[in-house]
Amino acid sequence: MRANDWPLPFWIAHRGAGKLAPENTLAAFRLGAQYGYRAFECDVKLSSDGMPFLLHDATLERTSNGQGVAGQMNWSALSRLDAGSWHSRSYAGEALPSLDALARFVLANRHALNIEIKPTPGQELLTGQVVGREVLRLWAGSGFAPLFSSFDPLALKGAKETAPGIPRGLLLDELRPGWLGEAQGLGCRAVISNYRLMDRATIAQIHTAGMKALVYTVNEAAAAQALIADGVDGIITDAVDRFSPV
């Protein structure tokens, strides 16, 4: 991947296929692809023995049959959990995927990927470092790379340390004081905010700073149309069945 390349198209499927399949599972990414999506967002954290795997929450209860803090379990135990039954019976037995497994899927299909680094509290820097190293290994020789993003600056710092050439985006759920300088200081290529925070003036600020402006999670047509008119560079959506990515 060349330094100036941007890895993502405009439309990005949230956690694979939004809410249509169990989030952050390979089944979700396959379903999102069936709707025509070629770019996906996912959440990655570390098991207790250092395996990067997909899960949004710090704890397991909401999206699996496991209990407790996910990052305190080893990968052997995590890989045996049922991460599909909570969503619907048709996905019973769906596993938590490792980053390695997801990489095989997206690379085989030449899909783009936004990896949100979602560390277990207290493992922010380490998670960024490990995910950075693993992405360099998994995407080596592919000619393209994912985008890293995180709400946590330490996680982005860790990814920058081990994979400086992989582009980064700062995630924001509020426009806190100094947010733009923070993104610049981390060498980010993008700012990715809650869509309610993004307007024409904010997009212009981000563009003037030489970065792209992306938003999450847009599920209504009116909001998407307004953001497109304001000049946003990318939309993350759950509504893969309603928004055509073409």
Image: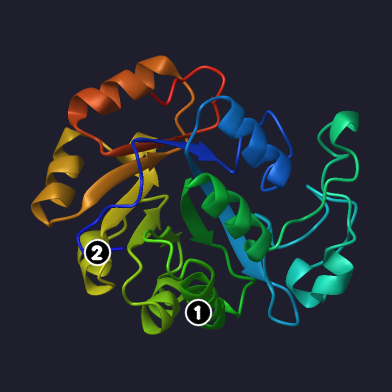
> In this view of the protein, can residue 18 be seen by the observer?
no
Q: Which residue is drawn at 46% across and 68% down?
A: 152
Q: Residue furthest left?
A: 208
Number of marks drawn: 2
Task: Provide residue 21's location: percent of width, then percent of height.
Answer: 72, 33
**Which amino acid, mark 1?**
Arg
- Between 130 and 58, the residue placed more toward the observer is 130
User: Which image quadrant: the N terminus?
Assistant: bottom left
Residue sitting at x 33%, y 64%: 167
State the residue position of label 1: 133
- Mark 2: which amino acid? Arg
Q: How crowded is mark 1: few (under 14 residues within 10 Å), some or many (20 or more)?
A: some
The residue that appears at 70% across and 46% down in the rendered structure is 26
Q: Quadrant of residue 203?
A: top left
Q: Which circle marks residue 2 in the picture?
A: 2
Q: Is mark 2 on a helix, strand or loop?
A: loop
Label 1: element kind: helix
